[in-house]
């Protein structure tokens, strides 16, 4: 009896194409293949969650930290949340309101809202 298993036989990864992606993954480390696809899917998923949150709250504005708390994300993900908001703004889905509030560490933070 052969007790060795090949890793590839245990896990099959199917390529998933995202229709109308909203997230951007910045491949600054030269990832390729499945790992790159996974990072792209995760970036799209986070941006989609953020956009869906804004869609569920039309007419309301939020800072990246407020989004982080509302979506119950780890504080370590603030950079990803900010990047997703910037990308959604660049793509014409969100806009900066001009309103600012004091957030973490006493710093001023801009607020964004969805463009209807």
Image: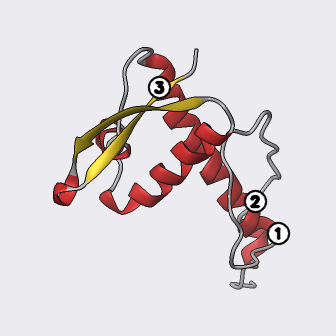
Left-right relation of 56 to 104 = right
Quarter of the image for residue 12 reads bottom right
User: Quadrant of the rendered structure where residue 11 is?
Assistant: bottom right
Question: Mark 1–mark 2 contact, CB under 8 Å?
Answer: yes
- For label 2, the residue is 37
For image coordinates 40% across by 33% down, the residue present is 98
Measuring from the top left, give residue 114's x and y in whole percent. Answer: 52, 24
Evaluate if marks 3 and 1 touch, with contact meaning CB atoms under 8 Å apart. Answer: no
Camera-nearest residue between 82 and 107 = 107
Render colour scheme: secondary structure
Vertically, is 97 above or below 7?
Answer: above
Q: Quadrant of the C terminus?
A: top right
Q: What is the residue that sits farthest to the front in this orientation? A: 98
Task: Return the x and y of residue 10 as percentages of the image width and height.
Answer: 71, 67
Can you identify the residue that label 3 sits on?
54
The image shows residue 58, relative to residue 20, as above or below, that is above
Q: Residues within 10 Å of mark 2 (few under 14, many from 20)?
A: some
> Can I make out residue 114 in this image?
yes
Of helix, strand and loop, which one carries label 3? helix
Which residue is painted at 74% across and 39% down in the image? 21
x and y percent of residue 66 in the render? 30, 39
Is label 2 in a helix, a strand or a loop?
A: helix
Crowding around mark 3 (Cα neighbors within 10 Å: few <14, some 14 to 19, many 20+) is: many
Residue 84 got which mark? none
Local crowd size for mark 1, using a 10 Å CA cut-off: few (<14), some (14–19), many (≥20): few
Q: CA distance from mark 3 to mark 1?
A: 32 Å
Mark 3 vs 1, N-terminal side = 1
**What residue appears at the point 49 percent right and 36 percent down from the top-left corner?**
50
Q: Residue at position x 77%, y 66% from top?
A: 34
Give the residue pinned by disc 1. 33
């Amino acid at each position: 009896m052969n007790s060795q298993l090949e890793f590839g036989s245990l896990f099959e990864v199917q390529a998933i194409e995202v229709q109308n992606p909203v997230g951007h993954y910045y491949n600054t480390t030269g990832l390729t293949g499945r790992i790159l696809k996974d990072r792209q899917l995760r970036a799209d998923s986070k941006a989609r969650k953020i956009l869906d949150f804004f869609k569920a709250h039309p007419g309301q504005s939020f800072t990246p930290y407020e989004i982080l708390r509302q979506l119950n994300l780890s504080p370590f993900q603030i950079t990803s949340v900010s990047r997703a908001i910037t990308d959604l703004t660049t793509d014409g889905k969100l806009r900066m309101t001009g309103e600012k509030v004091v957030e973490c560490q006493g710093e001023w933070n801009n607020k964004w809202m969805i463009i209807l």
